[in-house]
Image: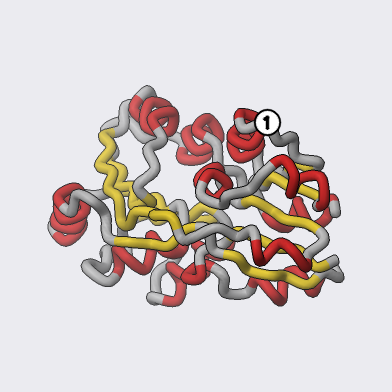
Amino acid sequence: MKIAVTKLEEKSEGIPELFRRYGHEAVIVSTMRAAPPTDQKPLTKLCEMISENKIDIIIFTSSLGVEKLFEKVRPGKNVRIVSVGPKTAKKVEEYGLKSETIEKYSSDNFAQYLGDTKDKTIGIARAEVPNPELLQSLESKGAKIVEASAYCLVPGGSIVEALKNVDAVIFTSAKSFEYSGFTKDLAKKLKVVAIGQKTADAMRKNGITPELVGDGTLENCLSQL
């Protein structure tokens, strides 16, 4: 199938090859673009703490977060780095550092994976999309959290035209769906896929029920297709 996938251009590396492995053709459509965070102070604070060796663990939720943070500071090799997904981990390794990979991105799963974090200081570099559940989960284990927006996501334009010649569309986040201009009429013509439950919930709130819901990874979505 010819499948549209809502990925930032900066985060689309390797997507065409991945889709070909599953026998499909990827059409990358960007409903968002990355911009500097609206408030630079939290990122500056996180960078200062990293440079002063005051951070024990760094969590990255995207490869773009890795790039934006490492443009400003590099942690020492004694800092534990945990990445969401293999692409994020690979980006860390491109900078000569080691990263653990967590496959399932959920608040409870993160807290369990990290183990004993009592009195540890955890830095989180992420998109400007709050995740209070993750913070509460980690803080309940006794960790101190220093989170910062490494970038924000702003609308990148409607994808309606791009969807005229595809068989399916995969929405990779709730925000990418909200910015897409996608309608119920379009949903009738395409196989519609949500990458995970949060994205599916955002779609349902707008009256669109995804035909398939993945586990948070493109690989799982593609295996279902």
Identified at 50% across, 38% down, the residue is: 110
Residue 23 appearing in the image? yes
What coloring was used for the rendering? secondary structure
Residue 53 appearing in the image? no
**Name of the residue lying farthest toward the top:** 140
Q: Quadrant of residue 141?
A: top left
Quadrant (top left/top right/bottom left/bottom right) for the C terminus: bottom right
Q: Return the x and y of residue 72 as percentages of the image width and height.
A: 22, 68
Badge 1, how many Cα within 10 Å: few under 14, some, many 20+? few
Towards the viewer: 180 or 18: 180
Q: Return the x and y of residue 223 as percentages of the image width and height.
A: 83, 55
Q: What secondary structure is marked by label 1?
A: loop
Towards the viewer: 95 or 42: 42
- Answer with left or right where residue 43 lies relative to residue 89: left
Residue 167, placed above or below residue 203 = below
Quadrant (top left/top right/bottom left/bottom right) for the N terminus: bottom right
Identified at 19% across, 58% down, the residue is: 47
Identified at 38% across, 63% down, the residue is: 66
The residue carrying mark 1 is 207
Q: Return the x and y of residue 145 as percentages of the image width and height.
A: 28, 37
- Answer with left or right where residue 121 lies relative to residue 171: left
Q: Amino acid at mark 1?
A: Gly
Q: How many marks?
A: 1
- Answer with left or right where residue 128 lies relative to residue 204: left
Residue 46, placed above or below residue 136 = below
Q: Quadrant of residue 206?
A: top right
Identified at 28% across, 43% down, the residue is: 147
Residue 214, placed above or below residue 28 = above
Towards the viewer: 59 or 197: 197
Q: Return the x and y of residue 9 as percentages of the image width and height.
A: 51, 70
